[in-house]
Image (spheres, rainbow, N blue to C red):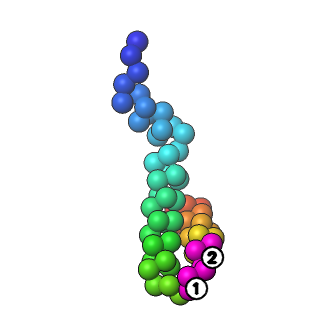
Amino acid sequence: MPFTIEDLLFTWEQVGVFDFLLPFILVFAIVFGILHYSGIFGRVGKGINMVIALVIGLMATRFP
């Protein structure tokens, strides 16, 4: 029996990719981009931007 795209998407849905992983990645990317573009922490703030984006992304997926 061949493995189809439909099977893959159904498996991802069961695991929670669409409920948690994709929204987390979207929120993380938006927050990181805004912090990076604004330059609020200067040139050395990339790590700080990443931590803040990670925390906000996790909080956004925790509270639907």
The residue depicted at 53 percent of the width and 53 percent of the height is 20
Point out which mark residue 48 bears.
Answer: 2
In this rendering, is residue 13 above or below 44? above
Is the N terminus in the top left, top right, bottom left or bottom right quadrant?
A: top left
Label 1, on which residue? 41
> Is 5 part of what is drawn in magenta?
no
Instruction: Report the span colored magenta.
Output: 41-48
Point out which mark residue 63 bears.
Answer: none
Tell me whether the residue at label 2 lies in contact with that at label 1, contact meaning CB atoms closer than 8 angstroms. Answer: yes
Secondary structure category for the residue under label 1: loop
32 vs 6, nearest the viewer: 32
Q: Which x, y percent locates residue 14?
A: 51, 37
Secondary structure category for the residue under label 2: helix
In this rendering, is residue 40 above or below 53? below
44 vs 30, nearest the viewer: 44
Q: Which x, y percent locates residue 46?
A: 58, 74
The residue depicted at 43 percent of the width and 31 percent of the height is 8
Q: Which x, y percent locates residue 60?
A: 54, 66
Q: How many residues crowd around disc 2 within 10 Å: few (fewer than 14), some, or many (20 or more)?
A: some
Q: Residue 45 falls in which quadrant of the image?
A: bottom right
Taking the view exactly as shown, the residue that stands out farthest to the top is 1
Q: Residue 54 falls in which quadrant of the image?
A: bottom right
